[in-house]
Every structure is written in C-alpha cells, then in structure tokens.
Amino acid sequence: MHATTSGTVGNTGRYGWEVRAVQDVRYSVQFYDGLFSHKNTVLLRAGVGQTPACQRRLIVIDARVLDLYGWEIEAYFRTNRVQFRFLPLEATEPQKTLENVLKVVRALNDFGVNRRSDPLIAIGGGVLLDVAGFAASLYRRGLPYVRVPTTLMGLIDAGIGIKTGVNFDAHKNRIGTYFAPQRAYLDIHFLSTLDERHIANGIAEIIKIAIVKDLRLFELLENNADRLIADRFAGRDAYREILVRATVGMLEELADNLWESVLERVVDYGHTFSPSLEMVALPELLHGEAVAIDMALSLTLASQRGLLSAQELRRALCLLETYGLPTHHPRCDEELLMKALADSTSHRDGLQRVPLSRGLGNAVFVNDLTRAEICRAAEYLATRGAHPVQKYERAAYATRAQVAQVPKHAIAPG
C-alpha cells in the first residue's frame, strides 16, 4: 500500500479544533508467471522504498502450500540472500481466529522486523490472507505486507481487496480491518495442485461477477464448462479472459468504495444469507459453495419478482450446477434465513440492500424482501435438491508428486 496523507487543523471556537485528513491509498494487483523464479526480483522489491542491505521477511504460509512448494520458495529467498522465517498455519475456516492472528504477531516479535522496510509476506488461500493481513494491520499499527494467493478464491476475490478479518462468536468476519497490501501477485502456477472442489469454490465468485455485471463473462463460463475445472485455467485463451474479467470486475467495484462508505455493493451478491449458512454448516460447506446457495436463492427471488425470466433462471442455476456447486442445503430453513437476513440488514446499517439480478449481467437493490417470498424461494430450490459437492474430494491440495506435473502457464509475465 502506498499512502500519502494531507490534513488541516481548523479552529471551531475557544479551545476547540477540527482535524481533517485525506489519505491516498494505492496498491497494485498483478498477474505474474513464475513468481519464485530465482531471477525474478519483484517480490524482493515489493513493499519497500529502497532495498536495504540486509533484507528480512517473515513468511506466513499455508501449511499445505509449504509442504508442496516450500523447497521452491526457500531456494528463492536463499539464492537472493534474504533472511527469512516460515510461519506455517493451518488455514481452513475453523482456524480463522484471533488466536492465529496473535500467532503471527508473536512471530513478528520473535523474528524482529523493521517497521517499514521488512514487509510480511502472506502465501496461501483466502483464510490465510485474511489472518495475516489482520495481523499486519495491528502490528505496530500497520506493517507493510504482500499477498501471494494460492487458491482461485484468493486470486479473484480475497487476495485483491483491502479487507482483513477473522470469525468471532459463530459470526463470519465479525472482527477485521481495512488494510491494503503493498502488492498482490497472482500466479496461476499454484492452481495446478489445487483440487477440483476448490477450483469450483473459486468459480462461484467468478459466477457472482458474471451474474451481476458481465454477461460476456457468463457466456465464457458457459462455453468453457467442459474443461475449465480439469484444466485449472491453463491451456485456453478464454481462460485468461475469464480470470482478467473477473479480477477487473471485482476491482472496479472496490476501487471507488474501498471502505464501504456506500453500502449498496453489487459484490455483496450471494452474501446476504451465505455468511450465516456457512458458519452453521462448517466444515461441510466451503465459502464459495455457501455463496452459490445464496445466489440460487437470490436468482429465484429475482424470478419471483419478474426481474429474471424463467429461461434466465434455468440458465443461471444450470451454470452453478454444471460447475458442481450446490443450489440448496438442508440447513436453509426459515429460521436460519430470517436470522441471516436480519444480521445482513444490521451489517448494512438498517436496510436490507439486497442485490438481485435484473436479467443476466445487471443488478438492482431491494429493501423489502418478505418472509413469505424467501420461504417460497427456498422451498422451490429444496424440491430440486441439487447438492453435488459430494463428488469432490475434501483435500485442498494435490500430493507432492503432482507438483512435477505442472502445466505450462496460461498467463504471461505481467
């Protein structure tokens, strides 16, 4: 994050003053092929003004990623004469806790880093990036950090915004901060060892962007459903376009509203009911799967209101199911859905502000969803009974033996 601050102090009367300050925040998001190639120095320069004579990096890394890629990452830093220490974390949703944030803080204390010239490096999926980013935002009230997402969810969603956070008291992301990374480097090399279920998990967030703002992206997902998951986004030019459109679509929505001063956010599509569902269904549902169920419910609500034709509804539900994503869950009963809506309404400052699709590729916001129509939509989806995620294995990453079978990268160096 590059930040410059300007401010003024004005007199408001006897012994009274008003302080006004404006902070300019800039960070870069870049696709980069072969990030840990020994000759590539972008990661060494990321987050520092001038490269100090002695570089130190605490590397917070997903434990499975360390098992698969640790040798490559270690060789990179040793070759470039960087003093480093790995902090491996188990990084699934149940581990998204304050305890793990404090583990990172303690590791920073023990290792010893300079406040501005030794940025933390976070390598992993969305959970790890949120935990490490939260710790960076707290340590000395702000330590520079760099994100290297290793899952599809991280590449196109969690890794490219500025939100950090952890779950608390059975609520998703209840505690967190807005804290931009210096850089986010997106290398699809890591997707080669991600299992199919977690590829589909990330595709849910791409479908979200497609439904609410990008019909072309929706069509690309339809046209490439035959091989996209198996190919792990490597091998077709269309895959590159899917990734770029999803990333740009998300960044366009975030850029003018990084601190969510405007609470009508189309990127909240699929995130009205899903946070509550995901927490009660742990560890059965992944984040993207809960979002898919929320999207199916939102699509049905839009159809009931005449915002979406019956053909468009079938088409969108079919796209979700084609990618192995669920459209219903037994825990989606009346009690949970109404509690979820109430919690989201509170989060959105007293109004529902629920994004619904208007056709495919557009969205509107509504504030008047009723219990009756929500229950009717849930009942419709329950009769369809689609819950296909069981066909996927639960492990997030492939075995070490598969690392050697990495396909040629689909995205050229940025």
Image (cartoon, rainbow, N blue to C red):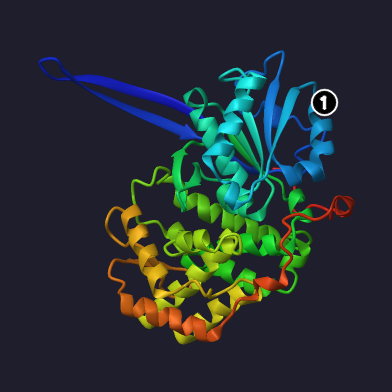
Residue at x-position 47% and y-position 72%:
332
Image height of 321 relative to 275, above or below: below
Q: Give, as a three-letter code, the residue at label 1.
A: Arg
- SS for callout 1: helix
For the image, the number of numbered tags is 1
Residue 92: image location, x then y, percent: 63, 51
Check the image and name the residue furthest to the left: 14
Report whether 34 appears left or right of 157: right
Mark 1 burial class by Cα count in 10 Å: few <14, some 14-19, many 20+? few
Asked if 30 appears above or below 242 in the picture, the reply is: above
Q: Which residue appears farthest toward the top when viewing the image?
A: 53
Q: In percent of the image, x 80 and y 24: which residue is there?
A: 80
**Residue 232 vs residue 389, the one in the foreground:** 389
Residue 277 position within the rendered picture, expressed as x and y whole percent measured from the top left:
49, 64
Question: Would you say 261 lies left or right of 207 here?
Answer: left
Q: Residue at x 36, y 58 (%)?
A: 343
Along the viewing direction, whichever of 19 and 219 lies nearer the viewer? 19
Residue 321 seen in the figure: yes
- Which quarter of the picture shows residue 103? top right
Coordinates of residue 270 in the picture (x, y in percent): 47, 64
Quadrant of res 281: bottom right
Q: Position of residue 6 (x, y in %)?
A: 36, 23
The residue lying toward the viewer, choosing from 63 and 363, is: 63
Can residue 42 be spotted in the picture? no
The residue that disc 1 covers is: 78
The C terminus appears in which quarter of the rendering?
A: top right
At 55% across and 43% down in the image, what residue appears?
Answer: 130
